[in-house]
Amino acid sequence: MSAPLTALHRCCQRSALLLVARRPWSSSSASPPPLHTRLLLYLAQRYYDVEMLMKWSSNLKRRGLQKKNAYYGYTQKFYGGDIAAAYFILSLKGRIRFLGQPAWLHADQSGKFNWDFLNHKDTPLEEVDLSYTVINYTGLGNLERQGSLRTLSLRGCPEVDDWFLGRLHIFQDSLEELDISHCPRITTGGLAALRNLKGLRRLDMSSLPGISSPGLVAILLEEMLPQCQITAIGYDHSLKQEEEEEKEGQVEAQR
């Protein structure tokens, strides 16, 4: 059924329920329906209103997310890729440090920031902290020209997923430290994409709820990235427990 017909059908249903609920019950007519029946009729009237409100709220949230992760092509055209990347990160309330500069730049709690970063044209970013921001796969495109990025923190980012991790290969020649802890949408499949980051020295994959066997995953990552120090804490099962469970499974299989 098409969208217009579905909307018309729902409108007719609501109208019918409204007429039933508002039907006058006189002494000469049949007795009014029980209280629970009238309550169900009332809730049925409100069901589609709530459903419509939830859809509207979801669409509004999605549009806001798209707007925050828009590609800063206009800024990049007039100020260059480095300034565009810095502007994008500061707009998300992230933190940045330019190459060769000791100070970090960041927005305050209200989202306002100093425009002094415009003085660093043609200076690439060396460290970026996007912890607890809403950056997603699309927004990552604003950083694709940052060939000197050494440290990237994505701690607690709700929109960072496996597709996002797969795109991190654009930093394979420079990235040394990566924090993806507390990201709820990351799974084992996404972590496998980190094998492209051959220069990675530190990886924090703590408290990833989408990982069922963090100890075994850490072992696989250590094999793929032997020079990388991996941190994996905040899980219910330790690596030793998982190894023991695996051995018990092998023993039972042999029986």
Image: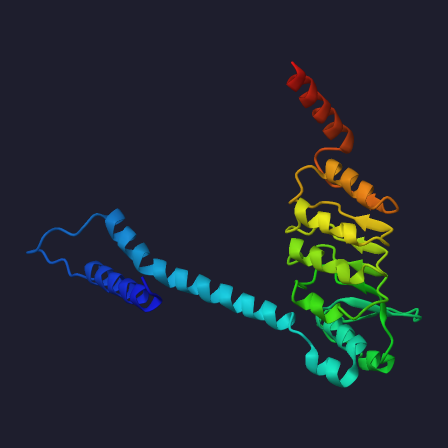
Q: Is residue 121 rendered to the left or right of residue 251?
A: right
Quarter-wise, where is residue 250 in the image?
top right
Instruction: Quadrant for the N terminus, please.
Output: bottom left
Determine the residue positioned at 85% across, 60% down: 173
Report whether residue 231 is seen.
no
Q: Is residue 37 rendered to the left or right of residue 99?
A: left
In the image shown, does 146 or 51 lie closer to the viewer?
A: 146
Determine the residue positioned at 32% across, 55% down: 43
Quarter-wise, where is residue 42 in the image?
bottom left
Q: Is residue 198 rendered to the left or right of residue 30?
A: right
- Please determine whether, in this image, residue 97 is positioned above or below residue 189: below
Quarter-wise, where is residue 23 in the image?
bottom left
In the image shown, does 2 or 96 lie closer to the viewer?
A: 2
Q: Position of residue 15 (x, y in %)?
A: 24, 65
Determine the residue positioned at 75% across, 68% down: 144
Instruction: Quadrant for the C terminus, please.
Output: top right
Report whether residue 239 is seen.
yes
Q: Position of residue 215 (x, y in %)?
A: 75, 36
Q: Position of residue 64 (x, y in %)?
A: 58, 70
